[in-house]
Amino acid sequence: MAGGGGAERAGVAVAAAGLLAPARRQPRRRECRERLSVCSKLCYAVGGAPYQTTGCALGFFLQIYLLDVAQLDPFYASIILFVGRAWDAITDPLVGFFISKTPWTRFGRLMPWIIFSTPFAVISYFLIWFVPDISRGQVLWYLVFYCLFQTLVTCFHVPYSALTMFISREQSERDSATAYRMTVEVLGTVLGTAIQGQIVGQVVTPCIQSPLFASESNASASMGDVNMTHYSGSLTDMRNAYMVAAGVIGGLYILCAIILSVGVREKRESSELQSDEPVSFFLFTSLAFMLLEGNFALFCTYTLGFRNEFQNILLVIMLSATLTIPFWQWFLTRYGKKTAVYAGIAPAIPFLILVVTLPRNLVVTYIVAVAAGISVAATFLLPWSMLPDVVDDFKLQHPESRGHEAIFFSFYVFFTKFTSGVSLGISTLSLDFAGYQTRGCSQPNEVNITLKMLVSAAPVGLILLGLLLFSLYPINEEKRMENKKALQDLREESNSSSESDNTELPSVV
């Protein structure tokens, strides 16, 4: 009887194990078909707005703010811009390394970095746009708070970028979420341009005639005093406008961080399996577009003479980019990501040449702005859509590696910010050598030639070099689908092994 009871219990245990195994496998099959909800994708996408909104405001306006509002010497302005961006680039791999060593909490591994960095980042961002009432130390003020903000926004952006790998294990879902994110990020650049540009654009500030024209003028001394008084009052209004814009953008930063932290759940299992193929061409294309971004306001103001229109032109670029993001998402799904790179970025070249060769015309400038926005959309979307493919390829080559997603994303951000620092430093120094006049009504011909080089010739050369290097990128659509199938097989094998271990215990019992 005892033996029969043991045999019976063993049979029941085996039967139970047989029943339990399908029960455990069923959730796995459902998981393979699991899709992210639209709400989750939107909440995830909203988290990309703070970085782009602040970055757009800094990229388009910080240079002209330091030169014409804070009235720093161009040499010191170039030091602030370059050192700030260089420091920002250095912090990216460091933050990525520390994130990879961060233990999991009930909020996840990435979310705590996003949550705790937000309030301090907003405070430091506001202080960048504040002109301290000190005769000495202004350079140090801007350098300290610029570097501090870059460090804190890195603590937000690097974990947010790596979060792509932890919201879903399905490539199609990650690509879809990335498209949502890029749409909102480009919309964030629109908001950054609109908020900063329109608020600041409401203040009309008089320019200062060069000493040559001033010496030829017959204006009386009393009239000069009146003009300088009006100039000082307008400058105060301009400084206040920059602070108001900073406050609005800071409030938007906090709101987006709250939506992200509440609406997105970080899934530890989404990247349980861990390409050294670099996306090096984006280093050069990023440098090209950042040269254009950093100098476009000055180019419109002085070379084209659209002093009161440049903020609207920037807004058209960003709106065009926002509206064409869905098209590029469809295009890369239909024709592949490599084809989308060539089709999206190469057409920017003739328009960059057109804007400096045709006679000055506002209508033509707006047409070029629309075309430039289409290429900007591709530049926004494609790198972040391709980077997860590189991470997946690395996982297949090094299946024993774990938790390196943040390092991959941080190094991409590092090179992006490094090129930004190089572009801003080179641009401001070039303008200094060309004889840039702070708040001048016009600039010497050498400055106009330099601006044309910075927004046309240099970006065109860098784009061509980047596309040439991109031809060496090995992950095409066929390779990507092979990686997807191989990763799915590894996950199924891992799950099957885990289920076998779980069924062994009831069998033994």
Image (cartoon, helix red, strand yellow):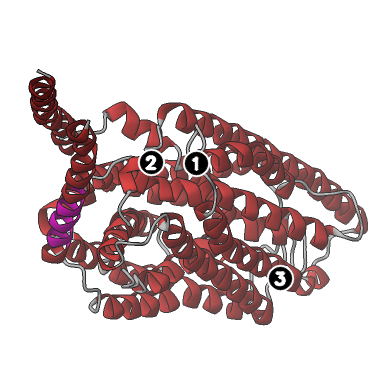
* Contact flag, marks 1 and 2 (Cβ < 8 Å): yes
Q: Is residue 166 above or below residue 344?
A: above
User: Is residue 70 something one can see in this rendering?
Assistant: no
User: Residue 489 colored magenta?
Assistant: yes
Residue 402 lies within the magenta run: no
For label 2, the crowd category at 10 Å Cα-Cα, with few meaning under 14, some 14 to 19 and many 20 or more, is some
Determine the residue positioned at 17% across, 60% down. Answer: 483
Q: Residue at x 58, y 49 (%)?
A: 155
Q: Which residues are magenta?
A: 480-491
* CA distance for labels 2 and 3: 42 Å
Q: Amino acid at mark 3?
A: Ile
Is residue 289 found left or right of 270 in the rendered image? right
Element carrying mark 2: helix
- For this rendering, which residue is in front, 219 or 97? 97
Q: Nearer the viewer, residue 375 or 411?
A: 411
Residue bearing the label numbered 1: 104
- For disc 3, the neighbor class at 10 Å (few under 14, some 14 to 19, many from 20) is some
Q: Is residue 239 left or right of residue 464?
A: right
Question: Where does residue 432 sit, x and y in percent of width and height?
Answer: 68, 76
Under mark 1, the amino acid is Trp
Which residue carries the number 3 mark? 79
